[in-house]
Amino acid sequence: MVRLRMERGQPFDLIFMDIYMPVMDGPQAAAKLRGLGCTSPIIAVTANVLSSETAAYREAGMPDCLAKPFTSQELWGCLSRYLTPVTNAPPTAAAEAPLANAESGTQPVLRRDVGLQ
C-alpha cells in the first residue's frame, strides 16, 4: 500500500508502526519501507520505551515513539510535530468530502474540531 501511494505521488503524511506484529516486526517493516524510498515519518507505537529500545527504533528509521497506553494529548503532540495544522477557516469543498480515494487525487484532512475529513 505504501509503495502504491508513493508510485502515485500520494505518499502518506505520517505512518504509525506497531512494534510487535505477526509477520514482520515494526523495525523490520520500517527498514523495508525506508529501503523502498519512503520518506514519510514513521512513528513507533509500543509499550517498550527504554532508551536502548527507542535507539533501536531510530536506527530502523522511526524518529519518534508514541508510548502505549497514550493519552489524546500525547497523540495530538505527536501529530503536531509532523503535520501542518489546518486553520479553523470555513471548510473547502475538499475538506467537506468524505475520505478521499486514490482516483480523486484529493487527500483527507485531519481537523481538530471535526476529526478526519
Image (cartoon, rainbow, N blue to C red):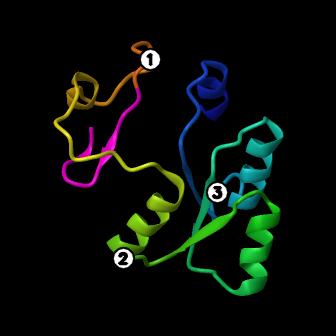
Q: Residues within 10 Å of mark 1 (few under 14, many from 20)?
A: few
Q: Residues within 10 Å of mark 2 (few under 14, many from 20)?
A: few
**The image quarter in which residue 39 lies:** top right
Residue 34 pos. (x, y %): 78, 44
Image side of residue 21 versus residue 57, left or right: left
State the separation of the CA atoms marked 1 and 3.
32 Å
State the separation of the CA atoms marked 3 and 2.
26 Å
Give, as a single range, the part of the protein colored magenta.
107-117
Image quadrant in which the N terminus is located: top right
Residue 50 pos. (x, y %): 69, 86
Amino acid type shown at disc 1: Gly
Task: Identify the residue position indicated by label 3 in the image.
Answer: 22
Give the number of the disc on residue 105. Answer: 1
Callouts 3 and 2 close, C-beta under 8 Å: no
Earlier in the chain: of badge 1 and badge 2, it is: 2
Helix, strand or loop under label 1: loop
Residue shown at 76% from the left, 66% from the top: 58
